[in-house]
Amino acid sequence: MLWLVPALPLLGSVVLLCTEGRLPKMVVAVVGSGSVGLAAICALYVGMNVVGTGEWQYTETLWTWMAVGDFNPSITLYLDGLALVMTGVITGVGFLIHLYATGYMWEEEGYSRFFAYMNLFVFAMLMLVLGDNLLTLFLGWEGVGLCSYLLIGFFHTDPANGYAARKAFVVTRVGDTLMALGLFLLFREIGTLEIQAALEGATATWPEGSGINTAICLLLLGGAVGKSAQVPLQTWLPDAMAGPTPVSALIHAATMVTAGVYLIARMQDMFLLPGPAMHWVAFVGLVTLFISAFTALVQTDIKRILAFSTMSQIGYMFLALGVGAWSAGIFHLMTHAFFKALLFLASGSVILALHHEQDIFKMGGLWNKLKIPFVSMLIGSLALAALPGTSGFFSKDAILLTAYNEASYGMLFWIGAVGAAFMTSLYTTRMILITFFGEVKTEPHDHSRINMWGPLLVLCALSIGGGWLGFMVLAPYMGDGGVAVEFHAELIALLTLGVPLLGVLIGYLIWGNHAISIDKFAASNLGERLRQFFFGGWGFDWTYDRVFVNPFVRLAQVNKSDFVDLMFTSIASLTTAIHLLVKQTQTGQLRWYATNMVVGLLVVVLIVIVQA
Amino acid sequence: MTILYLILFLLGAGLVACLAERLNVNAPRWISLLAFIAATIWTGAIWLGGVDPATGFYVVGELSWIPSLGINVILKVDGLSLVLVGLTTLLGIIAVVSSWSEISTNRGFFQFNILWVMAGVVGVFCAYDLFLFFFFWEVMLIPMYFLIAIWGHEDRSYAAMKFFLFTQVSGLLMLVAIIALVWLNYEATGVITFSYDELLNHEVSGTVASLLMLGFFIAFITKLPSVPVHTWLPDAHTQAPTAGSVILAGILLKTGGYGLIRFTVPLFEEASRDFAFVAMLLGVISILYGGYMAYSQSDFKRLVAYSSIAHMGFILVGVYAFNELGMQGAIVTMIAHGFSTAALFMMAGSLQERLHTREMSQMGGLWVKAPRMGAMTMFFVIASVGMPGLGNFIGEFLVLIGAFKVNVPLTVLATIGIVVAAVYGLSLMQRSFQGTPNPQVAAMEDFGFREISVYAIMIVALVWIGVYPQHVLDLAQPTLDALGVAL
């Protein structure tokens, strides 16, 4: 029965692809979103049953993918607490986004193709989280990358979209290559890619930890970093915003980009073995969450603000994983899926109402004109800024406090994370105030229907109530003591609670009533340089272009005609040259031939005499 | 004898097709198509017939030819041969359909050449006599030369000559090695024989073995091809008519890989093991250099041609990893690449027919005009980029996971090739079908039923291999066991 969950979206995708857009739009909408909705119902049903058995584990083997010697991965689906949470997010939030997209994409060309890709994505993502085998996981892993590529470049007549799509695919593939190497190493050492068996094997083989285990973990981390847009492979995500907004919501916020978090959580037994792997995870998260929070502060494109904020929030999840707060990390993954999907969809409504305007400085005063998007955006922002009472508050608070309790670098983690939390509420406040308040710069035309604002309202409810969901539903199934965290130091707890509020306050003073003016600083030389530095994402793109992209492109131009061929063409030219040379002797003059004969004869005689 | 009849059938069909042109100009292509369909069904019947438990082969046929020199017609079909023969006949159908409307001169002779190449290839895959093997090796060369030289594009005579010289010179090395091997065996046993099974029992060692091994090796990697003897391929593929490119990339290259597995490695196991590092290194260089060269091309067909070099590198790496995983990976790669690249060459042919150019700077945004062609190109680019769930991934993953057990640094380099594949594959897609529609392209006819049905065959094949490769693996496994090389 579990197989139906990924099979339904796959079927939807195949149907939509094979009919080549000949179906009426209404049918496409029903097939496209219905297949995901049915998958969600199936997932709920299977999930209830699995929980009902009390074992929280369920395996369903479909077939042996291939069998060569001792390498025999099977296509097996595995459902446990972690997979259930992920499946719920993918099908549940996925369905809401599909529903929204039926309205959002209505006017666009390629309606059917869009839903075909989206359904294919849901299928691949489900294979990723349900795969019992790292190879099945890799199937999903590459599949979501493909769909991400297809959907970023969905409007393919604009070369910029194509560039963004290829960049996303290639950069994540660098990570995928590292991950593949991790799989090779794991298979060589443990002899299986089946996740549960490999984890058992690893803990039995290297109870004291080992360099190989660390190497495998770091290679997997490499894959996770690529997919989840963490430093140093984060550069593709902001450009990926070229895709339609529902794509950004589904793939580049709620699901695919959290695949790295899922991978590490799934392989946690190996990361927990002694070794530096955990610290690497934590530091990757810390650096990313910090860098991207600053970058988000200076962006002007509403989707890019959200993209950097996504990177930053996933950084929090990595930090959580790195300090061992597994369930807090996954909890944040879930709440983030709610509020970030909400933010993206709400911003999509704003963008649509303003005829595809994405610059926040060309918006303004929209709060009483676009009421539902405004309320949605506000609620999403509250959760993003982790203000008390929202879902983001519970999950982020849990992460921050666990980070503080980490043995070796706890204080550093906490300061970095709290600092970034301040930045988060600051840029969120900026985004809301500039977009929705102040004078009206562009007149909006709201034409959203129930299929668009319905999902927004559901996501609003989840963004607020999702925290309680975490406590009530999630905690028992996550395996490691739930999300309750001991409050060690009152002051730390208080600061963690208060810093986001401070961010909102300062944000209001700057962009709300203009009590604090930053114009002077922004206009100064230093301010401008800082802004550019932050705006460009801390120079990563700049460096990569110069170190990797440009040399490769230039090298390709130089050697277009393949220098190896010279080896063979020079044989041909040499033969021709000799031919031309020898041809000179053939003059047709009798005296020339006679002279040559005499000279030749003389040389022969001379040689004979010398020899004798 | 079934397999001999199959070869004779293809040769005969070639003659008939050639003559039938006088009756009706369209008759040759129909005869050719029906002959390949019949041959495919025939191969399927051999598969269904199962292995003869007495011999361990599907089909065995022996016939005396030149007894005084120990030369006989020995044709045997085991799993590996069968799967490759199946690929050959199936690609025969695809080749004929792909050039359905492309050829307007000498149609009979064109089909004659196609049928004779394929007959030669089937012979190569089944010959168990080294002389016979060499005979078929040459049989597939000459008609291919004609295909390029007569029906090729603007630079056809240069390309055809280059193809001929490379194959001929390297083939000569193999012939010398064959004769030397037979001579050594004669000295040791007093029997002159070209029989593969007999020669397999004869142990050659030391420097002589290495030299003879190189004779075979060079012939096969020239065909494969591998860097540095690959330079005939971009010219030949680019200049050949569509059917020629489909046959070249789809099946002729695989005779090189087959030769390595069937002859080089088992006949000179010791020497091959010593040579493994160099061979794997050549494979890795081919993967990276081929990928990088593919990216730098602006000609659609040339790009695909270079990508073939990159993919064939995986075969070298897999075979010389000397383990089951690597070998099986190499075999799956041969099959999957046969379909994925044939499809892309067909696409190049269709584009040239419509736009009269292969330059991608003259294309751009074609998806808008021909969405079916765009979607098909996307599928096969994705396949050749190595997407899990499609055949090429299985092959490459098995090769890499097998090679990793043997040599980590080389495997790491080969794995980087996967990133390069994404770079050139997506760039192909972007430059031809995506981006701003090229204003010079007014309108373009999209694919109809004929093209779509051929592509459907290839899609089904790639999905099948990608989702359940066991059929191929099971067919090849007994061969590898019998050869005993993959341990």
Image: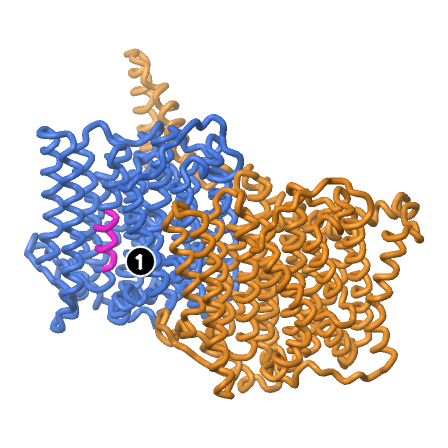
Chain colours: A orange, B blue
Q: Is residue A405 left or right of residue A455?
A: right
Q: Residue at x 14, y 60 (%)?
A: B45
Does residue A498 appear in this view?
Answer: yes
Task: Please report, as a chain letter, where disc 1 is located.
Answer: B
Q: Is residue A10 left or right of residue B206?
A: right
Compared with B210, A499 (above or below) is: below
Q: Position of residue A44 (x, y in %)?
A: 50, 74
Camera-side residue: B285 or B169? B285
Q: Is residue B264 above or below residue A402?
A: above
- Where is residue B449 drawn, in percent x and y? 28, 42
Residue sitting at 36 percent across and 47 percent down?
A: B341
Q: Secondary structure at mark 1?
A: helix
**Near-viewer residue (B428 or A487):** A487
Residue at coordinates 60% horizontally, 72% vertically from top-left? A264
Q: What kind of residue is marked 1? A: Leu
Rendered view: A400 above or below A368: below
Work out whether B88 lies above or below B361: below
Give the magenta range: B83-92
Instruction: Say whether residue B351 is left or right of residue A396.
Output: left
Residue A193 is at least partly visible in this image: no
Question: Residue B87 lies in magenta, yes or no?
Answer: yes
Q: What x and y, as percent, mark residue B447?
A: 33, 39
Q: Quadrant of the N terminus of chain A?
A: bottom left
Q: Position of residue B91 (x, y in %)?
A: 25, 48
Q: Which residue is the site of mark 1?
A: B260
Residue A306 counted in the magenta span? no
